[in-house]
Image: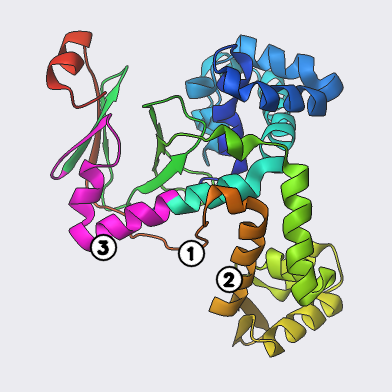
Amino acid sequence: MVSTLGPVSESLFALDLFGRQRGHEFSPWRKRVREQLGDNLPDIQRLNRDYRAVPDLLWILQRSRGLVSGEVAGDRSAARKAAAAAFVFCRAAILPYWSKMQAQLESERDARGRMAITNGVECLLTALHPKMTWKSPVLEIASETDREVCLDGEGLILSPSLFLAEKTCVFIESEKQSGMPALVFSVPVDPLELSDPCEASDTGDRALGALVGATRAAALRALAEAGTTGELSDRLGISLAGASKHATVLRKAGLIVTLRNRTTALHTLTPLGMALLQRRQRAAYQEEGEISSAYEVWPPMDNLVRQRSFTAEETTSTGRFG
């Protein structure tokens, strides 16, 4: 299980919430996104009008370009425009809120991870989502279409999403980074997670900066996900020498550890480094409770995913699919 398939996936799922008028509690978020989009707003409105994010735009998350669906399938120009608009929307609607969203998604993943540790993977799958039913060795998903996906030992990525429609699951045949099949399930998004990010960001940055200095704080945040010296250089937009110097200072302070393999150095946060980042998050989001930043990946399953279409009578009588 992973915490997220990334901000682009959340932006695709958020298109529906942005385009519809329901959910007045999200109106401030919609207003800020419209302001951020500026002259690009008509492109996003057109994207929402012409396509359904699920399933028409899921190809953006796929590794295989042969999985382009809907009207964009035969028109490369339309596909490029759709992808470009989706990325523009991601910058306006998701990235300003990403640290808060990521914290919630990590918390969701950790809670399910603890469930799997305590009660086993079968318990995790049984309680994963109202539209999923685990009948060993088959995971059944309520869907508009009938099909079976045999994993053949390839495994399955499980990922929560904040912006999927309530009680919705999405199956991705070949996730872009890993190439593995992925099953995305919805968890509720708190409108507070989409509040104005400026004040929270300033508060958290000042708190962390006061502890380690602004420059080192930026390097520490950049290593929230382990990376090499080259990756740290890219994330901060500085030279390799500068990145190496920052890593040395953080390592001597006990905030990171460095593993070397020939000419490559991989930097990872220590528990102290993670605690400092958590302190930054708590300073920014103290009214929203403690946020976990632990990272854990569960091994994939070797079973069958089956999608079934159910009539209204079936879903009502069983009560298993919400």
Label disc, if present, on residue 94 of the rendered structure: none
Location of mark 3 (residue):
117
Location of mark 1 (residue):
294
The amino acid pointed to by label 1 is Ala
Which of 125/68 is in front?
125
Callout in the foreground (3, 2): 2
Q: Give the mark, 1 or 2, whose residue is nearer the N terminus.
A: 2
Label disc, if present, on residue 274 of the rendered structure: 2
- Category of crowding for the residue at label 2, using alpha-carbon neighbours closer than 10 angstroms: few (below 14), some (14–19), many (at least 20): many
Which SS does the magenta portion mostly show? Answer: helix
Total numbered badges shown on the rendered structure: 3
Q: Can you tell which quarter of the image residue 39 is in? A: top right
Asked which secondary structure carries label 2, the reply is: helix
Q: Give the mark, 3 or 2, whose residue is nearer the N terminus.
A: 3
Using the rendered image of the protein, determine whether residue 306 is visible from the camera's viewpoint.
yes
The residue at 60%/54% (across/down) is: 286
Residue 254 is situated, as x and y percent measured from the top left of the image, at 64, 86
* C-alpha distance separating marks 3 and 2: 22 Å
Q: Give the mark, 3 or 1, whose residue is nearer the N terminus.
A: 3
Q: In this view, does 207 lie above or below 166?
A: below
Q: Is residue 41 above or below residue 156?
A: above
Residue 113 is left or right of residue 305, and the answer is right
The residue at 36%/27% (across/down) is: 167
Asked which secondary structure carries label 1, the reply is: loop
Q: In this view, does 173 lie above or below 265?
A: above
The magenta segment is 108-137
Which of 119/265 is in front?
119
